Image (spheres, helix red, strand yellow):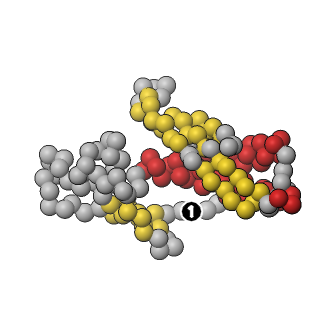
Amino acid sequence: MSNYSATVQWQRDGADFLNKEYSRAHCWRFNGGSLINASASSHIVPEPFSKPEFVDPEEAFVAALSSCHMLFFLDLAAQDGFVVDAYDDEALGVMSKNADGKIAMTRVELNPKVKFHNSAAPTQEQIESLHHRSHELCFIANSVKSDVIVTPR
């Protein structure tokens, strides 16, 4: 169907590798030219070996789910004749032990707040349908085991 690629680049900074005193900062490069500074989460690897101002894989996972859901939502809203003026999602990922006892992103909560153009705002039932359909279509949500909970604000 389609292929997607990313290049992850890291280089040792001269620090003591065997004692794990090396930086976890690295770069994500995408084929369109985007570069994102990334790091291990400071919840997992303490500073100065992580950089909390950089994106960590767990945040990227949550953002990917939120972004995918939003993109389908916008497309479906347009198909249904609703004009969206703004979309804001304060998404939250929860790490905990899964059924196998392994640490995993077990739950992602999407909390989208959508502002519709006044001329054609959908009913609450139509908004819920848009979110449900968006979730069903989201490629990322269809690719993960985590519970993805959508709670419109």
The residue at which mark 1 appears reads as 3
In the image, what residue occupies the spot 84% across and 50% down?
122
Q: Taking the image as drawn, is residue 34 in sight?
A: yes
Q: Nearer the viewer, residue 109 or 84?
A: 84
Q: Nearer the viewer, residue 147 or 117?
A: 117
Q: Secondary structure at mark 1?
A: loop
In the image, what residue occupies the spot 83% across and 54% down?
121
Q: Picture coordinates of residue 150 (x, y %)?
A: 66, 40
In the image, what residue occupies the spot 77% across and 57% down?
116
Q: Picture coordinates of residue 59 (x, y %)?
A: 46, 49
Q: Is residue 107 above or below residue 140?
A: above
Give the quarter of the figure containing the C terminus: top right
Lateral position of residue 12 relative to residue 5, left or right: left
Q: Taking the image as drawn, is residue 129 in sight?
A: no
Q: How many marks?
A: 1
Lateral position of residue 18 relative to residue 42, left or right: left
In the image, what residue occupies the spot 69% across and 43% down?
152
Q: Name the amino acid type tagged 1.
A: Asn
Q: Is residue 57 above or below residue 146?
A: below
